[in-house]
Image (cartoon, grey):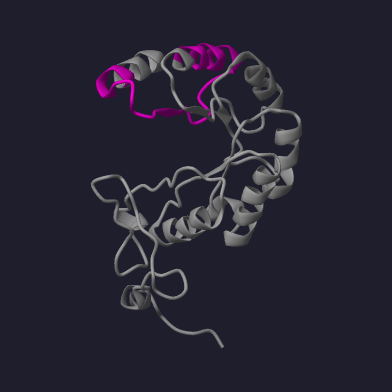
């Protein structure tokens, strides 16, 4: 079914649109290989998280069999200190991280620099909420080896903490903030709505 969906998407958008597949750890090795070969033929740009992050053994096998770039390490055990084996064992072509899961702006910048040392990209994952999206944007702008800015427009409980969220324009672009700090105004009134007292 996933292969049929990928074929339908490619047919719908044409050959000029960049497409990536995020499988969200859905497969075991045999199915991951089958899907990977199919999306290679469809000229997908990368293949993200086909196997669970702990399965370095099968990522290595998959990497040997496929030409499409593989991206894993979104939730790799050990975070920054667990990334080096993925590079040296050739289990991934791209690193993945974000300020929330990686542990903040500084660990994410270090992750990007680690990838850069091996001439790899570190593609930054969406932040999951308004303020994390802003922090991810700053890291994306600060490093030379992240090609895309991934942002899910926030709503519900994830739209939180900012007076105005990052807006994606009609061209699919976002723009660097120009104000001090992270460049976005904190919604202090909203944050103070939940205030009940200060512990002494």
Residue at horizontal 66 percent and vertical 54 percent from the top: 110
Residue at horizontal 34 percent and vertical 73 percent from the top: 187
Magenta span of residues = 10-38
Q: Nearer the viewer, residue 68 or 157?
A: 68
Residue 82 lies in the magenta-colored region: no
Give left or right: position of 49 versus 63.
left
Residue at horizontal 61 percent and vertical 38 percent from the top: 73
Q: Position of residue 5 (x, y in %)?
A: 34, 18
Q: Quadrant of residue 12?
A: top left
Residue 32 lies in the magenta-colored region: yes
Q: Position of residue 140 (x, y in %)?
A: 50, 53
Residue 182 position (above or below residue 18): below
- Point out the image quarter for the N terminus: top left
Give left or right: position of 115 versus 152.
right
Give left or right: position of 44 versus 97.
left
Q: Position of residue 178 (x, y in %)?
A: 39, 70
């Amino acid at each position: 079914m996933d292969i049929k969906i990928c074929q339908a998407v490619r047919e719908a958008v044409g050959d000029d649109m960049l497409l990536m597949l995020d499988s969200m750890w859905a497969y075991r090795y045999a199915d991951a290989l089958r899907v990977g070969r199919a999306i290679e033929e469809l000229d997908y740009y990368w293949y993200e998280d086909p196997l669970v992050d702990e399965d370095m053994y099968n990522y290595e096998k998959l990497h040997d069999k496929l030409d499409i770039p593989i991206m894993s390490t979104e939730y790799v055990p050990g975070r920054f200190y667990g990334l080096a084996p993925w590079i040296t064992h050739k289990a991934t072509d791209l690193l993945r991280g974000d300020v929330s899961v990686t542990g903040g702006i500084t660990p994410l910048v270090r992750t990007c620099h680690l990838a850069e040392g091996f001439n790899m990209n570190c593609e930054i994952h969406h932040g999951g909420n308004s303020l994390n999206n802003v922090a991810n944007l700053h890291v994306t702008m600060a490093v030379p080896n992240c090609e895309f800015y991934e942002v899910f427009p926030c709503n519900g409980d994830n739209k939180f903490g900012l007076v105005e969220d990052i807006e994606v324009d009609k061209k699919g672009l976002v723009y660097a903030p120009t104000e001090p700090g992270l460049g976005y105004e904190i919604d202090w009134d909203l944050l103070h709505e939940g205030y009940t007292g200060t512990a002494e």
